[in-house]
Amino acid sequence: MIVVTTSGVTGSKIVETLGMVRGSSIRTRHVGSDLIASLRNLAGGEIPEYTKMLAEAREQAIDRMVEEAQVLHADAIVTVRFQTSMVMSGAAEMLCYGTAVRLETIE
């Protein structure tokens, strides 16, 4: 599955638009990670525990979006975007969405 943030795929022509597809993942903070993150916050810099958590949430959201596109027999997902929002204190949603399309190779 081709997944791009652009409105098209180089070397291909969109022949059918199948509609919006999306995937999401909701993650909560871990008490142990929160304690370590609080200590790191005092010194400044990156908080790798949260970086890893958000990276995993992003990957899971992409996987779910791709699964939805495969059900539609799409060749690609174009104009992919990410959005995040707080669901409740200590929990955030990572949403990934785009447009499922069928492609034809340009000769």
Image (cartoon, grey):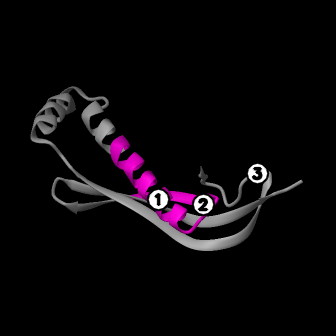
Front residue of 12 and 45:
12
**Identity of the residue drawn at 53% across and 63% down:** 69
Instruction: Answer left or right for 58 relative to 41.
Output: right
- The disc labelled 1 sits on which kind of residue? Glu
Whether residue 47 is visible to the viewer of this picture, yes or no, is no
Residue 33 magenta-highlighted:
no
Q: Residues within 10 Å of mark 3 (few under 14, many from 20)?
A: few
Instruction: Give the CA separation, mark 2 to mark 1.
Output: 17 Å
- The disc labelled 2 sits on which kind of residue? Thr
Residue 71 magenta-highlighted:
yes
Residue that mark 2 sits on? 79
Q: Quadrant of residue 5?
A: bottom right
Which mark is first along the chain, 2 or 3?
3
In the displayed image of the protein, which residue is found farthest to the right? 107
Residue that mark 1 sits on? 67
Determine whether the residue tagged by mark 1 lies in a helix, strand or loop. helix
Residue that mark 3 sits on? 10
